[in-house]
Amino acid sequence: MPSFVKRLISKPEFGPFVLLLAMVFIFWELNPAFLSLRNISNTLAFTVELGLIALAMTLLMTSGEFDLSVGSLFGFSPVLMWTLYNTGIASIEISFAIALATALGIGLISGLFVTRLKIPSFLVTLGMLLVVRGTALYVTNGFPQRTWNAKDLPLAQLLVGDFTVAGLRLHMSLLWFIAAAVLLSILLTRTKTGNWIQASGGNANAARARGVDVNRTKIKLFMLSAAMAGFAGVISSIRTAAANPNSGTGYELEVIAMVVIGGTALTGGRGTIIGTVFGIFILRLMRNGIVLIGVPGLAYNIFIGTIILAMMALHSWLDRRHQEGG
Amino acid sequence: MGALIQMQGISKSYGPVHALEEVDLTVGEREIIGLLGDNGAGKSTLIKILSGAIPTSSGTIAIRGERVSINSTSDAISQGIETIYQDSALVPELSIARNLFLGREPLKGPAFLGWMDQGAMSEVARSLLKEVGIEKDIPPTTPIGSLSGGERQSVAIARAMYFDSELIILDEPTNNLGVAETQGVLRFVRNARDSGHSCIFIAHNIHHVFQVVDRIVVLRHGRVVADDIDPAQTSVEEVERIITGMEG
């Protein structure tokens, strides 16, 4: 086998990329509507919202931690923003800034608990998941906040405004997603910060011995992850014209699945934004595709579980092969 | 020869166990010390204290006569003390070049961007690997996890070499190394002295120690039992007898 093919196959992004191509081809073969402009437009609109969270989670998981509270923040941040705005306490821009700042603060608290008190991120963010979701429900009495008059606001246009390219209706959120993917990929692969993130997850003691501030690196990533979840929640609330305190329930596991399917190691040290982008599309297109080809939506989890197991087996095999110099 | 490092009255206890008792160790400028002792003699404990990995129970450390406190590995590095452990303290997922420069990445462009100069990192890594005796043409972008134990050790040595530490502590650096790699390490130790560095060299293979050191210090049961053995005037067998306590 030529060496460039070997190198290509050994990359963690290769497996998810092939799977994504295969899925697109199979769903399109079984139902050509899968690649219709309307379906692509609808799928992209929802995909990038979860995708924004997955991008930040990739960095956090590369540093050896993860955050279960992102689904709750996805619900809480827009609830906070629209409550402030609807009650006349603040303008929409100030409300948006307060919502993001609060998300950053929640990320900071999670990060401090994990790094200073040495409590596993699973337990800290599980607690935070309940605190944040509980607060969203308590503040709203469980009712959605109205956002239906938001569409004409400049901020809403900036975040979710739609435009058409070659007959395809797209949202601004797609551009935010692309920008975030490019920036975070560069951050991880080209910068000193990316080196420190990977070192923190790969061998924290070795990183500390070289003067890397592992704790500060992880705290910043908890803050980024929380802020991105809040940002995605705000975008979703404007697009769907509702800030529901229950929205985002279960997203944390779906996001983590997207990241690991893409080739990022759950144990830290290895992460890939490109792989995560593939992982995001694999899960979202699977949900969309199985409905279009007539498989009952309730069977969705069977497919997702199978994909996760298959991709984990593939990544594990590639890792072993790599270690053996294959 | 002036003293670079002076450790005085160093003791370390783990509960009732005394790992080190009133140990004095001096390392001169441009001096290579061979630190020998049987398993459990206290060599690793002494080195861990000097490299900031563990605190001392009592005793003082001075560098060029000035008392210093070394509370962490970062403190030790900033004082010019670099330690190369048996397990190399590298990050398996990072490439050779990224490991070499971890914590001191060369940047290009505006500093706030933190943009690594990966071209320069690869270039330095390639030439350093040759200097420490890795003759295979391993690309600097290769992850450390896919290297052999010996190759990893060589990368750790290359790092100490590049960053010009004043005192380089090598804890079993020739373990698991091939002949060429071992010769590379020994050559590196000699070069280090010639270019003004001091070294503490710990190895189970006494023959390796004899090839490079100026003076041998022997620890037994946490105490210094000999600290001025001249390898040019002493046989390997005599040193072995001192290590085991069977001097007769």
Image: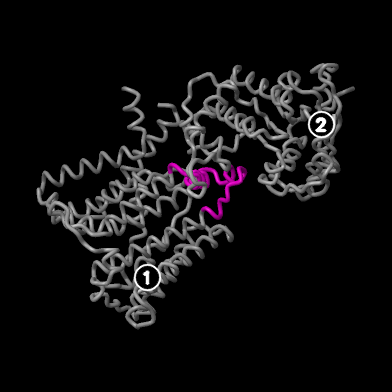
User: A150 left or right of B21?
Assistant: left
Q: A234 and B71: which one is in front?
A: A234
**Residue A199 forms part of the magenta stretch:** yes
Q: Position of residue B226 (x, y in %)?
A: 86, 29
Q: Distance between the Cα atoms at labels 2 and 1?
A: 63 Å
| Residue occupying the point 17% across, 57% down | A164
Q: What subunit carries mark 1?
A: A
Q: Position of residue B205 (x, y in %)?
A: 70, 22
Q: Which mark is residue A96?
A: 1
Range covered by the magenta-colored residues: A189-217
Q: Which mark is residue B28?
A: 2
Q: Examine the residues drawn in magenta and state their main secondary structure.
A: helix
Q: A45 and A287: which one is in front?
A: A45
| Residue occupying the point 83% across, 23% down | B241
Which image quarter holds the C terminus of chain B?
top right
Secondary-structure class at tag 2: strand
